[in-house]
Every structure is written in C-alpha cells, then in structure tokens.
Amino acid sequence: MLTLTLSVASLMETQEIAIFFAQKLKRGDIMTLRGPLGVGKSAFARAFIQHLTSPEEEVPSPTFTLVQTYQTSMCEVWHFDLYRLSQPEEIWELGFEEAPGVAISLIEWPERIDALGVLANALSLTLALGAAEGARLLHFQGSLSWNALLGDAQKRFGGILGSL
C-alpha cells in the first residue's frame, strides 16, 4: 500500500488538490473522505464535483439526503455522506451497488460501512487540521492500483510518499 501526505496552507490549496484528483479518477473509482466534523471533507468534494460540472453547480453536503448525484461529461459522480447511517447495511438502500457501474463515488464518513468490506480498493483520503489556521494535512492511502496516481500527485504537489 502506498501513502502520500500533503500539507496545505489554505482552502484554495485543498481545492487545487481536489481538482487534480477530479481530472484523474474515472467511472468505477471510489474515494473515501475521512476526518472529524469541519475539517474540509465536503469542501474537497465540492471542488471535485464543481470541476467536473461547473463552478456554479450547487453542491450541498448530502448529510440529510445521504447521496447526491451529478452528471458530468465523462460519467456521473455520486456523493455519499454516511454520517447519519445507523447500520452499515443501510448503504444498500441508497443504491450503492449501482454506483461502480456508472459513477465515481465520493464517500464521506466511510467508517460507517467499513464492516461490510466494500471499500478495499478505494482511495482513502483522511483530512486533519494543520498547525496554522486554514492549514490541513491530507493523507492519501490506497492499494497497489493507486500507486501511479499517488506518485503523480507527489510529483505535482510534493509531500511525503511512503508505503505500508
């Protein structure tokens, strides 16, 4: 497994990284977004989705709807927010099994479904607060299939590349 840790100083830098990944992910890819409330999971997803749709696209956090879908020129994007799930199996009621065939999936609060084992091939992003106001640490982790992409991200943004 490869890991990449990037340090960003602002929301704008986080958005730039989200755009990079929006340009690289494809239909069937899953990216999970982990971290505490207020750390920027929805902001990352918003920048990702707006890059693929339009800057004016309204991208609310799907906290209450649990999933929002967006049509892009290459495929759909399904944005899940699983914070309100009470049981992992509730993911099936949202049509989760259909997403890999038609969409890129962005999943906030994936730990709510970790027990199902359906995220083994996902690219995981964990966001954490940085030392300064607005700063964040973005820690990416993925299976071998993500090595090239994480290597490209390291070349583009710097950061610390490692393996587990």
Image (cartoon, rainbow, N blue to C red):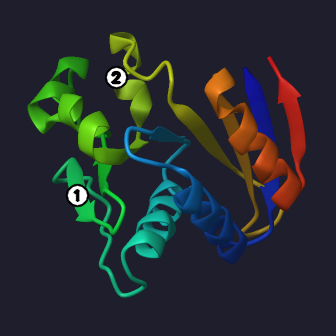
CB of mark 2 within 8 Å of CB of mark 1?
A: no
- Residue 94, given in percent of the width and then of the height, sits at 14, 37
**Element type where label 2 sits in the image:** loop
Q: Looking at the picture, how far across and down is residue 27, in whole percent?
A: 38, 45
Which image quadrant for residue 113? Answer: top left
Label 1 SS: strand
Residue drawn at the location 56% of the way across and 42% of the way down? 35
Q: Please name which of the two marks, 2 or 1, marks the residue nearer to the observer.
A: 1
Instruction: Describe residue 5's horizontal placement relative to residue 59 as left or right.
Output: right
Count of labels in the image:
2
Q: Nearer the viewer, residue 61 or 152?
A: 152
Amino acid type, label 1? Thr
- Residue 116 appears in which quarter of the rendering? top left
Residue 127 pos. (x, y %): 63, 47
Most distant residue in the bottom direction = 56
The N terminus, quarter of image: top right
Q: Is residue 52 above or below residue 111?
A: below
Q: Which residue in the protein does label 1 denote? A: 69
Residue 69 position within the rendered picture, expressed as x and y whole percent measured from the top left: 22, 57
Residue at far left of view: 93
Distance from label 2 to label 1 (Cα)? Answer: 19 Å
Q: Is residue 80 left or right of residue 117?
A: left
Q: Quadrant of the C terminus?
A: top right
Q: Residue at position x 79%, y 39% from top?
A: 4
Identified by mark 2, the residue type is: Ile
* Residue lying at 38% horizontally and 82% vertically, measured from the top left: 54
Disc number placed over residue 106 in the picture, else none: none
- Name the residue rendered at 18%, 53% in the picture: 64
Earlier sequence position, callout 2 versus callout 1: 1
Q: Residue furthest front?
A: 74
Q: Which mark is residue 113?
A: 2
